[in-house]
Amino acid sequence: MKSHKNCPVCNKNEFLPFLNVKDHFLSKEDFILQVCPDCKLVLTNPYPDKVEIGKYYESEKYFSHPDKVKTFFSETYELVKKINIKYKFKVATSGFVKGSLLDIGCGSGDFLSLAKMQGWDICGVEPNENARSYSKEKTLSNILSPEELVLQADHSFDVITMWHVLEHVEDLNWQCMQLHRLLKPGGRLIIALPNINSYDALYYKEYWAAYDVPRHLYHFSFSTIRQLLSKHGFNFLKREPLKWDAYYIALLSEKHRAGSSNYPLALLNAWKSNFNAIKTREYSSNIYIFYAS
């Protein structure tokens, strides 16, 4: 295990207790969340190093092949996912005619496939070897390993997307420097993240599924993601909600808390989260849109 000595956002060398959270998804181990007293970034601390972290992803749920057995829940999930991907593409490319797009953490390539169908030049990055192979076959395009990303030329892309990926990245500052290097001046960076200030996060507390320790190393708010990107030359443009995420997260969180699925209560809490966010803008997950200066 490794420990953070300094906050990656503000460099403060002190952390305070925040919450103890169990890995409900896989290992059932307990992990500690701490908070920076200055910028309020929440971190999983200590966290598994590069040698250890792989075992916490050893589940087909992190890349489940589309040919698996269909169930009502999986069919519903796939339908919502298709709707969500179209929405994400609209948000990410609004204002652009066409261009070059890099999707980091592209999984099985669904988002990239849509972008290619719409005439975009696409490239993906995916650490999972099985997912990378499947995505290459599906998109017939360039899908890189993370190590190959540094070989890409400066200012190569009009749009870079990271859909629930940045919270998994150990070295935030290195990643942000790469993002700025790869984007064209004025290019757009799209980052989707769970929101620790959402109603469902505050309601479920240590059972909130989007903490997803130890795979999620960082737990962002609107303030902390803006601070991190600002120091790397990105200007904030706007944020957009991912309303469907509240339902998925509430269903998992309710199962973590009660040990079984309570669909009515989970759906009610998801609806409350989205309803409260109409005024607060603190949705369960948000899309943050930045542009490179």
Image (tube, grey):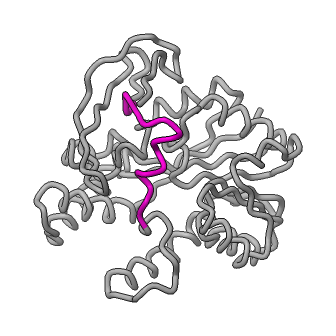
Q: Examine the structure image and report whether residue 50 is included in the region drawn in magenta.
A: yes
Q: Residue shown at 42%/44% (left/top)?
A: 216
x and y percentages locating residue 224 in the rendered image: 47, 30
Residue 151, given in percent of the width and then of the height, sits at 84, 44
Between 73 and 274, the residue placed more toward the observer is 73
Q: Give the range drawn in magenta.
A: 43-59
Q: Residue at x 25, y 65 (%)?
A: 251
Could you tell me residue 99's position as x and y percent? 83, 60
Quadrant the C terminus occupies: top right
Q: Which residue is drawn at 61% across and 31% down?
A: 229
Name the side, left or right, on which 109 lies relative to 41: right
| Relative side of 120 to 58, left or right | right
Residue farthest to the front, as pictured: 51
Residue furthest toward the left? 258
Identify whether 260 is placed above or below 35: below
**Residue 242's quadrant in the figure?**
bottom left
The residue lying furthest to the right in this view is 153
Q: In this view, does 227 lie to the left or right of 72?
A: right
Quadrant where the N terminus lies? Answer: top left
- Give residue 156's position: percent from left, percent from top: 86, 48
Residue 77 vs residue 269, the one in the foreground = 77
Q: Is residue 155 magenta?
A: no
